[in-house]
Image: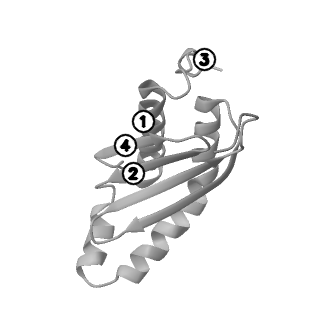
Amino acid sequence: MDQAASAQPAAGSGELAAAISNAVVRIHAQHKGRGPTRAKTYLFDDVILTVTEEGASAVLRTLVDAGDENLVQSIRSRLHGAIAGELQAAVEELTQRRVRAVVSGAEIDMDIDCTVFLLEPTDGPET
């Protein structure tokens, strides 16, 4: 583990949310050639939600403008499947918790993606 990975932000902190946002943007940029211009992560008990904006490449935007939204949705879905493991590993490393599932959805016209990380429950009381 490198030095950056060993300095873990405290659970529930703004630093943790920012670190998750940065990891999601970095992973998208590695695979798409560019990352989203905006990202925000929300932390809940056993759920993490990351919302990214303006992450579509020029190619995808051109296809949307040409009316090929179904093709773009299919490409985004396939890409999510290809990178879900990396996203999961990053969140597990940052939170020190197991991720049960990674679920993604997109609003194509607005160029907004949402990624939900469902964490294994802790032994604490249920709400």
Amino acid at pointer 1: Asn
Mark 1 and mark 3 lie on one chain; the one further toward the N terminus is 3
Of residue 112 and residue 67, the one placed in the foreground of this image is 112
**Residue at horizontal 58%, vertical 30%?**
94
Q: Position of residue 85 (x, y in %)?
A: 64, 50
Quadrant in which the C terminus appears? top right
Can you identify the residue that label 4 sits on? Answer: 40
Q: Position of residue 5 (x, y in %)?
A: 58, 22
Amino acid at pointer 3: Ser
Mark 1, secondary structure of its residue: helix
Mark 3 and mark 2 lie on one chain; the one further toward the N terminus is 3
Tag of residue 22: 1
Q: Are marks 1 and 4 in contact (CB under 8 Å)?
A: no
Q: Are marks 2 and 4 in contact (CB under 8 Å)?
A: yes
Q: Position of residue 64 (x, y in %)?
A: 29, 76
Tag of residue 10: none
Please give left or right for residue 87 compared with residue 1 in the image: left
Q: Residues within 10 Å of mark 2 (few under 14, many from 20)?
A: many
Q: Quadrant of residue 103?
A: bottom right
Q: Are marks 2 and 1 in contact (CB under 8 Å)?
A: no
Quadrant in which the N terminus appears? top right
Can you identify the residue that label 2 sits on? Answer: 51
Q: Is residue 14 above or below residue 114?
A: above
Please give left or right for residue 17 compared with residue 35 in the image: right
Mark 2, secondary structure of its residue: strand
Can you identify the residue that label 3 sits on? Answer: 6
C-alpha gap between disc 1 and disc 3: 16 Å
